Image: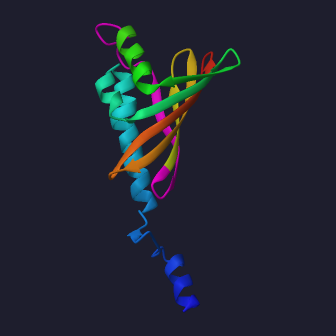
C-alpha cells in the first residue's frame, strides 16, 4: 500500500483536501497572463481601472523610503497614479517583464522588473488563487536610480 502511495505522489496524482493539485506550468502561465494583462497594461497606460483588476481589494504595498518602512493600500496608490497621470497618456516608456514565478498550490510569488529611462524597479508580488482567479494580495518593491 505504501508503494502505491509513493507512486501516486511521484506521478503528481496526489490531492489536497479532495481537490487535484493544479498543474504548475498551467498556473504559472495564468499568473504571467494576469500580470501582463492587468498590472503591466494598467501601469503602462496609467489606466487604474485595468490595474485594479490585478489586485485583490485588500492588497497592500510595502517599500522602504529614507530607511523607513512605508505601508500603502493599493487603492490609495492607484488613486495617486490616476491623479498624476499625464493627459493625454504618455507612450510606452519602459520595458517590463516577469522574471520568475514560484507556484505552490493556490499561493504564488512573482518577481517582476520594470526598466525606466532613469530607474529600474523590481517588484515582488504575492498572489493567491481565490474563486479560481489569481489576485495580487501584496506588493513589495525596490527602486534603483540611474540608467539600466
Colour convention of the picture = rainbow
**What residue range appears in magenta?**
85-107
Q: Quadrant of the N terminus?
A: bottom right
Is 137 in the magenta?
no
Residue 43, horizontal then vertical, whole percent: 39, 24
Q: Quadrant of the C terminus?
A: top right
Q: Residue at x 57, y 18 (%)?
A: 119
Side of 119 where 95 appears, left or right = left
Q: Nearer the viewer, residue 143 or 67?
A: 67
Question: What is the residue that sits farthest to the right in this orientation?
Answer: 67
Q: Residue at x 46, y 27 (%)?
A: 95
Residue 34, horizontal then vertical, whole percent: 36, 41
| 26 vs 1: above or below | above
Q: Nearer the viewer, residue 132 or 102?
A: 132
Residue 96, horizontal then vertical, whole percent: 46, 30
State how many labels appear. 0
Side of 95 where 121 appears, left or right = right
Side of 68 where 80 appears, left or right = left
Indicate the quadrant where residue 38 lies.
top left
Q: Nearer the viewer, residue 129 or 46?
A: 129
Q: Residue at x 44, y 20 (%)?
A: 77
Q: Residue at x 44, y 47 (%)?
A: 128
Is 91 in the magenta?
yes
Question: What is the residue that sits farthest to the bottom in this orientation?
Answer: 1
Residue 71, horizontal then vertical, whole percent: 56, 24
| 25 vs 48: above or below | below
Amino acid at each position: 500500500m505504501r508503494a502505491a502511495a509513493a507512486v501516486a505522489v511521484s506521478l503528481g496524482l496526489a490531492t489536497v483536501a479532495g481537490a487535484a493539485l493544479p498543474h504548475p506550468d498551467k498556473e504559472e502561465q495564468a499568473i504571467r497572463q494576469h500580470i501582463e494583462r492587468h498590472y503591466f497594461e494598467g501601469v503602462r497606460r496609467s489606466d487604474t481601472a485595468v490595474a485594479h483588476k490585478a489586485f485583490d481589494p485588500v492588497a497592500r504595498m510595502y517599500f522602504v523610503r529614507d530607511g523607513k518602512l512605508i505601508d500603502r493600500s493599493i487603492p490609495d496608490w492607484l488613486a495617486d497614479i490616476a491623479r498624476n497621470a499625464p493627459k493625454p497618456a504618455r507612450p510606452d516608456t519602459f520595458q517590463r517583464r516577469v522574471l520568475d514565478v514560484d507556484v505552490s498550490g493556490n499561493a504564488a510569488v512573482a518577481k517582476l522588473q520594470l526598466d525606466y529611462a532613469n530607474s529600474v524597479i523590481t517588484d515582488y508580488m504575492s498572489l493567491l488563487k481565490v474563486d479560481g482567479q489569481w489576485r495580487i494580495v501584496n506588493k513589495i518593491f525596490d527602486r534603483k536610480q540611474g540608467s539600466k
